[in-house]
Image (spheres, coloured by chain):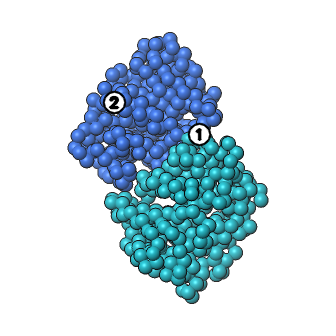
Chain colours: A cyan, B blue
Amino acid sequence: MTLETVSTAKSFGGTQGVYRHASRETGTDMNFAVYLPPQAAGGAKLPVLYYLSGLTCSHANVMEKGGYQRVCAEQGLVFVAPDTSPRGPDVPDDPAYDFGQGAGFYVDATEEPYAKNYRMFSYVTAELPALLEEHFPVDSDRQSIMGHSMGGHGALTVALRQPGRYRSVSAFAPIVAPSRVPWGQKALGRYLGSDQARWRAADAVALIEDGARVPEILVDQGTSDSFLESELKPELLEAACRDAGIALTLRMQEGYDHSYFFISTFIEDHLRWHWQRLQS
Amino acid sequence: MTLETVSTAKSFGGTQGVYRHASRETGTDMNFAVYLPPQAAGGAKLPVLYYLSGLTCSHANVMEKGGYQRVCAEQGLVFVAPDTSPRGPDVPDDPAYDFGQGAGFYVDATEEPYAKNYRMFSYVTAELPALLEEHFPVDSDRQSIMGHSMGGHGALTVALRQPGRYRSVSAFAPIVAPSRVPWGQKALGRYLGSDQARWRAADAVALIEDGARVPEILVDQGTSDSFLESELKPELLEAACRDAGIALTLRMQEGYDHSYFFISTFIEDHLRWHWQRLQS
C-alpha cells in the first residue's frame, strides 16, 4: 500500500506527520496523523496508541490541541489519530453535524447508501494497522486504544470486540450506550438498520451485557459537559462494569466541559496509564 | 470599561477565557484570551505574561495550540493573548495575508485609511493592560511579554520602547528588522508612510541602534523555518545586541519550522525563563 506524506513538523524532538492513502475499505483517500517520538530514529519497533476522535473532528483536532507530543516523546510512544469517517464529494453525507461525514461511529455500515464507504470499524482495526506496520516502526504486540466522545465509543467497542488485541483502553467523555441516546440511535439506525439486535455489537454497554470483556477501563468525564446527561450517561457503563466484574476507573472531573481544554488537561494521565500497561 | 465573556473552559484547574470589549483605540470590538491559573481563586494579584501572535492569527491560535496552560497553572501565571489587529466589515483590509486584518504589526498607524483603527501599539500597551487591571487579578508591577513572528517583532519593540515596564521579553522566530524585509517594508510603508525615519521606532534592530535597551532577550528560532532567510534574519538582532551589550540568548533549534509544533515544544522553557524574572 502506498502512502503520501501530506506534512511533517518537528515536535518535541520527534515528527508529527500527516499522511494520506487510498483506502480499500472506504473507497476514498483517507488522512491520518502519526506522531513518531525521537526514539523512532533508533530503528526499534515502538508501542503504539490509537486515538479515535469525536463528532465533527478529523485527525487534526487532537494533533493540534491534544498536547500529547511532550509525553509521547518522553516515553517513546507512537500516537496515531485516524479521521472519523470517509470524506469527499462522492461520499453520502448529511447536513447534520452528527451523521455522515465526520461522524462514522466506527461501524461497518450495512445500509444503503452508506455501506460502500462507511467501513470505519474495518478501517481502524485492520486496514490502518496493516498500513502502519508496513510504513512505521510500530510493535503490533504492544497496542493500546483511546478515544473521545464518539471516539470513546469507538475505542470501547473496538477493544471489547477484540479481546487481548489491545493492552489497554481508555476514553474521555465516551458515548457508552449509543443504542439508548439520540446521537447513537440516529447513527446506528441509519448505518446498521432498524433491527436493534444488530446494534448491540456497536454498543459498549450491550457488548458487556452480552459477555464481552476487557480487564479494566479508564474514563475521564467532565461534570460540566453539556452532553453528559443526554448523550454520555457514564452511569450505564458503571453499572455494566460492576455487574461484569470489569475494573472501571471513572473519574468525574469537577467543572470540566467536553472540549480539548478538558482532554489536554488529563491526557498525560491517560498516556502514563497506557504506558504502564504497554511495558508488561 | 465593560467586558463581555465570550467563553470559558476549565483547563489544568484554572480558567481559559475569551473576552470581548469595545475598544476606544481601534474603534472596534476586540477579542482577547486570558488564562487564569488556579491560584487566581486565592484573591492575590498574579504576575502576567503577554503573548503577541503572528500574521493571520487571532487570540485563538496560541490558546488552542500553544500548550502554555499546564506550566502557567503550576506557576500561578496569568497568560494574555490579544488579537493581531482590529477586525470587522468597516475596518480597512487587504486581500493579502500579510497586511490589514490579522496583520496589525503592533504599530499606531499614521496613514489613511488605517490611522483610525490600526492602533495596536496603544491597544496592547495601554488600553488592554488597563482593562485587565480592572477586571482580572493581575499585578502590573510584574509583567513580561513575548511573541511569535510578527508578534515577536511586537514584543521586542514594545519592550524596547518602554524600558523597565516589562521584567523580561522573549520571542519565537521574530521579525527583528521589519524595515529590511518584505513583510515589514510593506506593512510599515502603508501604516506609517514612506518616510523610513519614522519606521525606526517600529523596528527592534533600529531601536537598539538608536539607543533603546533591555537587559536581555531570549529568542528561539527553527532552522527549518521557511521564513528564516527572507523575513526573520536573526543575525541582524544578534549583531545589534552584540554592539549594544544586550545579553541575547539566540537558540537555533535544529529542524524546527515556523508552526505551533515548534512553539509548543519550547514554550515551557520561555515560561520558566520569564517566571524566574517575574519573581525578583
Of residue A167 and residue B235, the one placed in the foreground of this image is: A167
Query: Residue at (46%, 72%) from the top-left corner?
Result: A246
Nearer the observer: mark 1 or 2; the answer is: 1
Q: Which mark is residue B248?
A: none
Q: Residue B74, image x and y in percent?
A: 36, 42
Cα–Cα gap, marks 1 and 2: 29 Å
Specify few, some or many for label 1: CA neighbours under 10 Å numbering under 14, 14-19, or 20 or more. many
Give SS at disc 1.
loop
Image marks 1 and 2: residues in contact by CB distance under 8 Å? no
Q: Quadrant of residue A118?
A: bottom right
B226 in relation to B205, above or below: below
**Count of residue discs:** 2
Q: Residue B201, image x and y in percent?
A: 44, 21
Q: Residue furthest front?
A: A280
Quadrant of the snapshot with the C terminus of chain A: bottom right
Q: Residue A237, image x and y in percent?
A: 44, 74
**Which residue has dot 1 on it?**
A13
**Which residue has dot 2 on it?**
B278
Left or right: residue A21 versus residue A68 is right
Quadrant of the snapshot with the N terminus of chain A: bottom right
Of residue B71 and residue B6, the one placed in the foreground of this image is: B71
